[in-house]
Amino acid sequence: MLPGDKALWLPSALLLLQVPGCFLLSGPSTVTGTVGGSLSVQCWYEEHYKMHVKYWCKQSFITCDKIVETDGSEREVRNGRVTIRDHPANLSFTVTLENLALQDAGSYGCGVTIRWQENPTFRITVLVLPETATTTASHLKGITSAMGPSLSMSVHTWPSTTREDTSSPSPQPRSLFSSIHFLLLVFLKVPLFLSMLSAIFWVNMSQRCSGGR
């Protein structure tokens, strides 16, 4: 590439500084869209470019590859997801990118075709953003609200489980007391009662024997 060609790839704002009073093309330096949406770019040109072909191109390291161009009329021309329309009345043309994808981000250019000369272009940066934070937050809010009742129910079930655990051992002291009472009855009260009966029987027998003598 020749040293003089470097100036052709400078932004149009720098070209205007290099040649005071020279107006070629102008437009926004940056445009932004979201995935799945669309964006429009309006580029302005000089009056003596009114009858020239206008185009939208993708900037590469050396060239700007044409994507879509006008056909010399004011009707809209489409190439895939990109359309272009010339508005000679206000010396501008509009480019629309539809159904944006992340791969559409990059450097583009508005251009005018001039025979036997280097085509003037104006460099524009296209930014494509993913889903907005608002949409993500609304999804999270919906998930949280859906899980809310189940979480509250689980919180309320814990105290009831704890009360059941603490009240379940209460019958154990009663059963223990019944077993002790049974052991006392068998090993203490019954033998004592039998001993008393034996003593009464022995006293009666002794009195009968002494009376007989």
Image: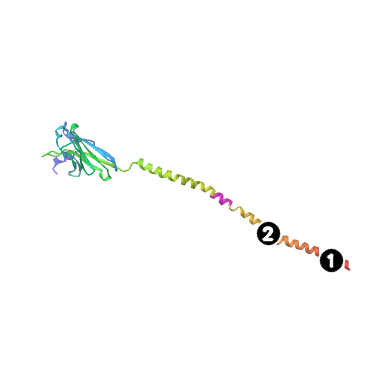
Q: Quadrant of the C terminus?
A: bottom right
Q: Nearer the viewer, residue 14 or 202?
A: 202
The numbered mark at residue 206 is 1
Residue found at the very far left of the displayed protein: 116
Which class describes the residues within 10 Å of circle 2: few (<14), some (14-19), or many (20+)? Answer: few
**Residue 169, position as x, y percentages in the image:** 59, 53
Residue at the extreme top? 21
Residue furthest out toward the bottom: 213
> The N terminus appears in which quarter of the rendering?
top left
Task: Identify the image quadrant of residue 115.
Answer: top left
> Image point 81% across, 65% down: which residue?
202
Residue 175 relative to residue 65: left or right = right
Residue found 64% across the figure and 56% down from its top: 176
Does residue 123 appear left or right of residue 188 in this picture?
A: left
| Placement of 182 over or under 159, stated as above or below | below
Q: Residue at x 49, y 46 (%)?
A: 153
Residue at 54 percent of width and 48 percent of height:
160
Q: Secondary structure at mark 1?
A: helix
Give the vertical position of 176 relative to 62 (above or below).
Answer: below
Gap between marks 1 and 2, in whole Å? 35 Å
Instruction: Give the magenta part as a residue range.
Output: 161-167
From the image, give the main secondary structure of the stretch colored magenta. helix
The residue identified by callout 2 is 182
Q: Which amino acid is tagged 2?
A: Phe
Q: Position of residue 188 (x, y in %)?
A: 72, 60
| Label 2: which secondary element | helix
- Residue 177 vertical placement versus 21 (above, below): below
